[in-house]
Amino acid sequence: MPSRLWHPFADMSAVRDREVVFTRGEGAWLEDEVGRRYLDATASLWYCNVGHGRAEIAEAAAAQMRELAGYHTFGDHANRPALELAERIAAIAPMPEAVVFFTTGGSDAVDTAAKLARRYWHAVGRPEKQVIVHRTSAYHGMNAYGTALAGIPANRADYGTLIEATAVVPRDSTETLRELFEREADRIAAFIGEPVIGAGGVYPPTDGYWAEVERLCREHDVLLIVDEVISGFGRLGTWFGSERIGVVPDMITCAKGITSGYVPLGAVVVGERVKEPFWTKPAGGGAAQMFRHGYTYSGHPTSCAAALANLDIIEREGLVARVAQMESVLWEGARRLEGHPAVGEVRGGLGLLAAIEFAPHVLAADAGFAGAAAAAARQAGVVTRLLVGHSLQVSPPFVLTEAESDRLFDGLRDGIDAAVAARGMVAAAW
Ligand SMILES: Cc1ncc(COP(=O)(O)O)c(C=O)c1O
C-alpha cells in the first residue's frame, strides 16, 4: 500500500512506495525493519551527537513526563528543567551574562533571532535598521525567515515575496560585506552565518574570515548572529563553534545537538547588549521593553529534561574533547577518497564534518550519478545523503570509533564504485 507520509525534501512520486523504515539505533548504528544494519554517517540530520539508544535520556524524559509533561513558560511561568538548562547553556556560552530564549527547533531559533535583532534596534531608537545579511550557500531553516535568508537558490525559489529586508553576500567575501556595510549599515540590523556552512555543502571558513566579519560588524554597528544549529554542542570540538572560529556573537541560534535530537528543542542564546532593553528598566523609570514573541513549547519541561541528560552525557564522557581528537581521524579517512576518479573535492577538517563532492565532469555526464552513489552507499551499509546535488554528507555521532570511521569511508567508496559499475560508466571515458 503506498504511504500517506509526505516526506520533507522528497520527490514523493519516487519515494511513496519505496521507503526505508528504520526501527532501532545504537551508538553510530541503525537498523531497519527487515533487520539490515547501517552505519549512520550523518548522525541523522547532523544532530545525534551522543549516538543512538541512550536509555538515560529516555529515562529523564519519562521521569519528567510523569511529574509534569508540559507546561508553558509565557509570562512568569517556569519549570525547573527550563531554568536549569538556561543556566547551564549560559555557563558554556561564549558570551558573558548570556540569557536563553527557548524555541522548538532551529528554524524557530532563526526566526526568533532575526525578529529580536529588528526588535532590538527598534527598542534603542533605530527602527530603520531592519535588513538581515546572509551568505550564499547558507541554510538557516525553512520557516519564512530562514527561507528568505536561504543561500541555496533552490530553497528560496518559487515562493514569491517573503521577507524583503534581507541582503546576500558571497560566502567567503569580506570585501563585499565591507562594501555593503559602508553603503547601507544604517539599514542593517544583523549579519547571520554558520561557522562552517553545513547543508549548503560543508564549507569551512577561509583563513581570517570570521575575525574580519566580527570586526566589520563592530565597526559598522551591526549585530552578529552565529547560526550554530549544527555546530552547537560540540561538533567543532568546542562547546560552541563560535569559540573555534574565535568570535563573540550577539546571538547564537542552536537546536539539534542540544538534545542530540532525542526530542525537539531549539534556543537563541542572547548576549548582554541585545538583552539589555528587554531585561532592564529604562533609566527614567517605566517598564522594560517586552519581546512579544514565543512558542507554545518554548521551555517545554520534557524537552529541557532530555537536554539536561544529553549535556550530562557529553560532559561525563568528555565528548567535546573526543570530537577534537577524532577530527584528524575523520579528515584522514575523508581524504582517502580524494584520488577517486569520480570525486572532485573533499572538504572538511574542522570538527566532525566533511563532504565528498563529485567531479563536475561526472555530474555533467550523468545528472543522476550523485543520487545513485548515495543510494548505493546505503546498500553498502552506510547511510549518507546528498547535499546541494553534488556532495555526500559526513557528520557522524561523536561516539564513532576509529574502526567505524574506516568502515564509513570504505562504505562510501563501495557505494561510489557500485554506482559507477551500475551506470556503465568507465573512468577512462570521463
Ligand atoms: C544552520 C542551520 N540553521 C537552521 C536549521 C533549521 O533547523 P530545524 O530543521 O531544526 O528547523 C538548520 C537545519 O539543518 C541548520 O543546519
Image (cartoon, helix red, strand yellow):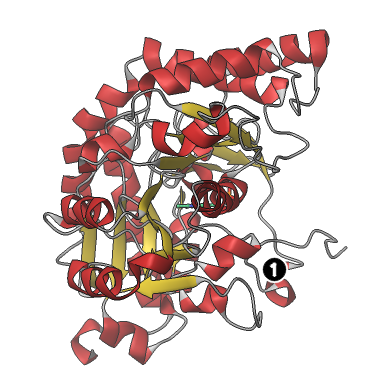
Dividing the picture into quarters, in which one does residue 343 lie?
bottom left
Residue 21 visible in this rendered orientation of the protein: yes
Classify 335 as above or below 32: below
Question: Where does residue 95 sit, x and y in percent of width and height?
Answer: 33, 30
The residue at 42%/78% (across/down) is 369
Where residue 417 sits, quadrant-wise, is bottom left
Tell me the quarter of the image containing the N terminus: bottom right
Question: Which residue lies under the disc numbered 1?
Answer: 15
Task: Report the residue that reaches farthest toward the front.
Answer: 284
Q: Percent x, y for residue 422?
A: 43, 77
Q: Nearer the viewer, residue 385 or 163?
A: 163
> Which quadrant holds the C terminus?
bottom left
- Residue 331 vertical position relative to residue 284 in the rendered view, above or below: below
Helix, strand or loop for disc 1: helix
Regarding residue 390, the answer to whether it shows in the image is no
Q: In the displayed structure, does residue 47 sit left or right of residue 265?
A: left
Q: Amino acid at mark 1?
A: Val
- Position of 284 relative to 418 (above/below): above
**In the depicted structure, whether residue 257 falls above or below residue 415:** above
